[in-house]
């Protein structure tokens, strides 16, 4: 603060500007001592008020962080959707139950699939019976082959005998031709019967394989009517009741890990470049509004949501809350850097994010370091003794 004498001199100069030229001062000098004192006090107070509007930078700790919001997720958490449509006839688990991978969750009554399964099993049983050598189809064909072979044997013998007689000039040519025709006809019939047996046997075997595949598909359909857990976990929610219609568009349940819960955070696209795995985050939950829990950033999903313009960041609790459930709403402060001794000024004193008012005609450029919601670290441009004016 200026001395009293200096303030008087400054006040006199100001009065010279306010009242007029220096030639009017003699009239001013005629004023009483009391008036002089009042004017001096007025301008002194004005000068002190200007000095009270200044501050200097302080030295202290600062922590720069990035804000994020999100929810608690269970590892492996997923929604159970049915593979078939049908009425829910039984629910085999309750909310909060611990389940093993492969454990049945409920039963769906799908009449159409049940009939298809029955048809597949019936077709399989029929083909298994027909493909056997003693089955009705092949037995009949084998009998036809035996009959054709016997007929061929008789006609072949008769033809040989007639040909021998003809060679001895016994019998007529017509008899020989008849015997030869009967022989060739029997031979062709035998070959046809044998071929029919072989082809039918192969066709039945192929159809048997197809029937077995159909039964396997139908069995898979039976599994589809009984949704099962994919993981060892806990049933967090059941979203259907017995008697309701299950459709492939509507989830039936939510299942996730019973013990491994993590944080799924959303970070703005402008801040994501500063976030790295391994950084510490302090988590606040609505259920624990007076406590901050420590966590660690573990994964950054390298894809931006076009609608929210945010990136997904996963974090794991280092200090886990006593009670924790999926979909708890959380807010996070991801620590970027911390300094124990930094030259700090209030963020409201910055002009255009890079200048400070130091009393000169032009703002003083400064280099900015870490910043939080209240203060900004100044790396270059001023020191702890520089007087700063709030813009």
Image (cartoon, rainbow, N blue to C red):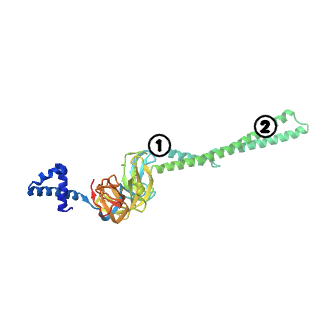
Quadrant holding the N terminus? bottom left
The picture places residue 349, in percent across and down from the top left corner, at 29, 56
Characterize the local packing of mark 2: few (<14), some (14-19) or many (20 or more) Cα atoms within 10 angstroms. Answer: some
Residue 163: name its quadrant: top right
Is residue 125 in sight in this rendering?
no
Residue closest to the eye, 338 or 30: 30
Is there CB contact under 8 Å for labels 2 and 1? no
User: Is any part of residue 223 visible from this angle?
Assistant: yes
Under tag 1, what secondary structure? helix
Q: Position of residue 202 (x, y in %)?
A: 65, 46
Among numbered discs 2 and 1, the one appearing first in the sequence? 1
The numbered dot on residue 214 is: none
Q: Which mark is residue 182?
A: 2
Position of residue 59 measured from the top left corner of the image (x, y, whole percent): 31, 65
Residue plotted at (17% across, 61% down): 5
x 13%, y 55%: residue: 39
Depth check, front residue: 80 or 314: 314
What is the crowding at mark 1: few (fewer than 14 residues within 10 Å), some, or many (at least 20)? Answer: few
The answer to whether residue 176 is left or right of residue 251 is right
Query: Looking at the image, which is closer to me, 343 or 234?
Result: 343
Q: How many labels does the image show?
A: 2
The answer for how far apart the CA atoms under marks 2 and 1 are is 56 Å
Q: Which residue lies furthest to the top in this view?
A: 174
Name the residue: 56% across, 45% down. 123
Residue for badge 1 = 112
Horizontal arrangement in the rendering, residue 208 relative to residue 313 (left or right):
right
Q: What element carries label 2?
A: helix
Q: Quadrant of residue 44?
A: bottom left
Residue occupying the far bottom of the picture = 340
């Amino acid at each position: 603060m200026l001395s009293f004498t200096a303030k008087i001199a400054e006040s006199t100069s100001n009065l010279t500007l306010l009242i007029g030229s220096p030639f009017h001062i003699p009239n001013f000098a005629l004023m009483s001592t009391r008036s002089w004192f009042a004017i001096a006090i007025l301008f002194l107070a004005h000068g002190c008020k200007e000095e009270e509007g200044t501050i200097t930078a302080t030295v202290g700790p600062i922590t720069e962080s990035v804000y994020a919001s999100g929810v608690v997720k269970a590892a492996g958490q997923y929604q159970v959707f049915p593979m078939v449509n049908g009425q829910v006839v039984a629910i085999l688990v309750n909310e909060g139950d611990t389940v093993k991978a492969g454990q049945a969750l409920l039963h769906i009554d799908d009449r159409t699939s049940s009939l298809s399964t029955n048809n597949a099993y019936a077709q399989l049983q029929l083909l298994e019976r027909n493909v056997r050598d003693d089955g009705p189809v092949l037995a009949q064909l084998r009998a036809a082959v035996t009959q054709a072979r016997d007929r061929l044997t008789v006609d072949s013998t008769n033809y040989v005998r007639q040909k021998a007689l003809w060679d001895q000039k016994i019998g007529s040519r017509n008899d020989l031709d008849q015997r030869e025709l009967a022989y060739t006809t029997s031979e062709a019939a035998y070959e046809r019967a044998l071929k029919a047996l072989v082809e039918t046997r192969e066709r039945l075997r192929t159809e048997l394989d197809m029937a077995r595949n159909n039964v396997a598909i139908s069995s898979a359909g039976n599994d589809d009517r009984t949704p099962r857990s994919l993981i060892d976990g806990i049933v967090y929610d059941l979203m259907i009741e017995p008697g309701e219609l299950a459709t492939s568009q509507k989830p039936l349940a939510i299942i996730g890990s019973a013990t491994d819960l993590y944080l799924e955070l959303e970070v703005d696209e402008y801040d994501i470049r500063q976030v790295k795995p391994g950084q510490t985050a302090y988590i606040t939950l609505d259920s624990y509004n007076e406590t901050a829990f420590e966590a660690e950033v573990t994964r950054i999903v390298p894809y931006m949501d076009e609608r929210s313009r945010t990136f997904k960041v996963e974090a794991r609790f280092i200090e886990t809350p006593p009670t924790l459930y999926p979909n708890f709403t959380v807010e996070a402060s991801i620590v970027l850097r911390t300094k124990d001794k930094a030259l700090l000024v209030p963020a409201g004193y910055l002009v255009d994010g890079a200048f400070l008012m130091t009393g000169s005609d032009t703002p003083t450029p400064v280099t900015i370091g870490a910043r939080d919601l209240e203060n900004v670290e100044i790396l270059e441009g001023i020191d702890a003794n520089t007087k700063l004016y709030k813009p």
